[in-house]
Amino acid sequence: MSNPLTHFDDMGGSRMVDVSDKAPTHRVARASASLVMAPGTLRLIRERGTAKGNVLEVARLAGIMAAKRTADLIPLCHPLPLDSVSVTFDYPDEKTLKLEAVVGVHARTGVEMEALTAASIAALTVYDMCKSADRGMIIQRIQLEEKDGGRSGHYLRKER
């Protein structure tokens, strides 16, 4: 039986997965993260009242930049010429900021890690820009929501 952990060979050694036999296809991944904070902190973000400027635009840019640099951060990721990266924000309640990153590429391997990296770094950027107002913020539920393309097809997260 072959090893189900594709980044290890049969002897347990690390390896970059060989994708040379895969056909390039359109692939998309969507990941999310949430930040829970004091209602006053979320108000500052929404009203652009922080001393550091527009928190969400800086976080959006950080997420986009992070997606483009994923292979430099995650050792066994393939460098990919991304076609698109977007980071959006939503306010499900008075103390939660939810962000979502969507990444697209035409390649031999998927962009799940790029979407997760974008979501993670965007969330960390919000924390960095607002920590002087609220060091108790919680970054939570960094997760893959959906991916499409490639041999494994479509995946959509089911709530647990």
Image (tube, rainbow, N blue to C red):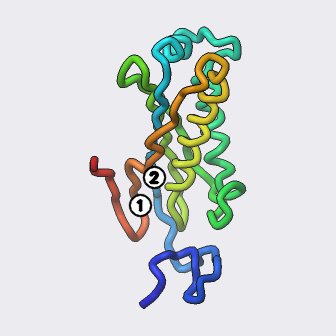
Choose top left, top right, bottom left or bottom right for residue 48.
Answer: top right
Disc 1 marks which residue?
Answer: 149
- Under mark 1, the amino acid is Gly
Residue 4 is situated, as x and y percent measured from the top left of the image, at 45, 78
Residue displayed at 67% across by 41% down = 65
Three-letter code for the amino acid on which mark 2 is drawn: Val
Query: Which residue is painted at 65% across and 26% down in the image?
Result: 58
Residues at discs 1 and 2 in contact (Cβ within 8 Å): yes
What mark, if any, has residue 28 been given in the picture?
A: 2
* Mark-to-mark CA distance, 1 and 2: 7 Å
- Looking at the image, residue 28 sits to the left or right of residue 15; the answer is left
Give neighbour class at mark 1: few <14, some 14-19, many 20+ (Cα, 10 Å).
many
Secondary structure under the numbered disc 1 in the rendered image: loop
Q: Which numbered dot is residue 64?
A: none
The residue under the point 65% across, 44% down is: 66
The residue positioned 70% from the left and 16% from the top of the image is 52
From what the image shows, is residue 4 above or below residue 43?
below
Residue 121 coordinates in the image, percent (x, y):
61, 40
Q: Position of residue 139 (x, y in %)?
A: 51, 36
Q: Residues within 10 Å of mark 2 (few under 14, many from 20)?
A: many
- Expressed as whole percent of the image width and height from the top left, the position of residue 53 reads 67, 15
> Does residue 126 lie above or below 81 as drawn?
above
First of labels 1, 2 by sequence position = 2
Helix, strand or loop at mark 2: strand
Count of marks placed on residues: 2
Question: Looking at the image, which is closer to me, 86 or 76?
Answer: 76
Q: Quadrant of the N terminus?
A: bottom left
- State which quadrant residue 95 falls in: top left
- Towards the viewer: 45 or 131: 131
Q: For this rendering, which residue is in front, 132 or 3?
A: 132
